[in-house]
Amino acid sequence: MVLSNEGAVDTPPGQEKAQELPVPLEKRPRHIAIIMDGNGRWAAQRGWPRIEGHRRGVQAVGRVVRACVRWQIPFLTLYCLSSENWKRPPQELSALMELLGQFMVEARREILRQNIRLRILGRREGIPDHVLREMDKTVSLSAENRGLCLSLAINYGGRSELVDAVRTIVNKVRAGKLDPDQINDQVISDHLYTSGLPDPDLLIRTAGEMRVSNFLLWQISYAELWVTQDCWPDFTEEHLRQAICDYAQRVRRFGGL
Ligand code: IPE
Ligand code: IPE
Ligand code: MG
């Protein structure tokens, strides 16, 4: 059970446990987005196959989701597979699909128990039918949940997302349902896969690369960046706590003074 909280005391979310994080609620990021990178390197450092890194990466997902639930972070978005990752060898891709399908089944009970709402961001093409079925099931069973909103970016590309949004907007204009003069930032945001989600406040990347790799290009305009050298399978609650504490010290100016 990837999201299970083994060994932890079952405390209502946001009560005593929230005090483990020395940052008042109003100073915490509302939306954390994570580029979970370095699974392959983590495995290679141990002489193991890359997929073992992905497998251990799933456990890190469980740790981070549990911490976000406890610390009352309302939105968490995880980059699981980019539209460019299809360039990888077929064996790695099929192993990743297996892991995804497995996650969707095994995490379902815990997602529902923790009142988590699951969303999927990305194009459906290329994802095997059985994985889509399990994904859709968890998404629809959790649709009314009001706890953490967990978005998984799967076959996601920031540019494809903008292309899809432009197509939908143009079709609405053509059909006479939208006046081009009304198109503004909000209209564009409303046509992205992330429609309805606030923009990320904090963008975390593991494994040290200083790039965004086509993740949430529109949405991260003013996100605070936090990068660790550690690979994703080694990411713990401690890393997340540090990232949130650092975030709380940042001065966000949004172009003002
Ligand atoms: C991130 O780890 C997971 C995916 C992109 C699916 P990588 O697989 O990119 O690991 P590295 O960056 O090669 O070490
Ligand atoms: C970004 O990692 C995608 C995910 C974490 C899913 P990559 O490993 O694909 O990024 P690059 O290739 O190093 O830019
Ligand atoms: Mg990588």
Image (cartoon, rainbow, N blue to C red):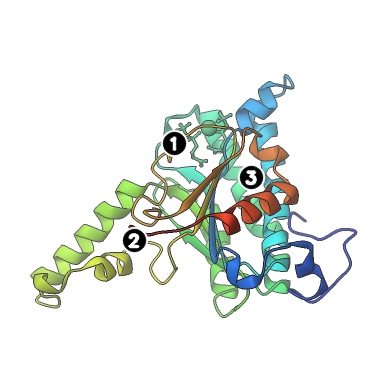
| Residue assigned mark 1 | 211
Residue 235 or 52: which is nearer the viewer?
Answer: 235
Query: How would you rate the neighbour count of disc 1 (Cα within 10 Å): few for under 14, some for 14-19, many for 20 or more?
Result: few
| Residue assigned mark 3 | 99
Q: Which corner quadrant holds the N terminus?
A: bottom right
Could you tell me which secondary element the residue under label 2 belongs to? Answer: loop
Tell me if I can see residue 109 in this picture: no
Could you tell me which secondary element the residue under label 1 belongs to? Answer: loop
Q: Amino acid at mark 1?
A: Arg
Residue 62 or 112: which is nearer the viewer?
Answer: 62
| Residue assigned mark 2 | 256
CA separation in Å, label 3 and label 1: 26 Å
Tell me if I can see residue 63 in this picture: yes
CA separation in Å, label 2 and label 3: 45 Å
- x 72%, y 23%: residue: 48
Could you tell me which secondary element the residue under label 3 belongs to? Answer: helix
Going by the image, does 241 lie left or right of 97? right
Of the residues under marks 3 and 1, which one precedes in the sequence? Answer: 3
Q: Nearer the viewer, mark 2 or mark 1?
A: 2
Q: Amino acid at mark 2?
A: Gly
Spot occupied by residue 63 in the image (x, y as percentages of width and height): 73, 53
- x 51%, y 32%: residue: 209
Marks 3 & 1, CB-CB < 8 Å contact: no
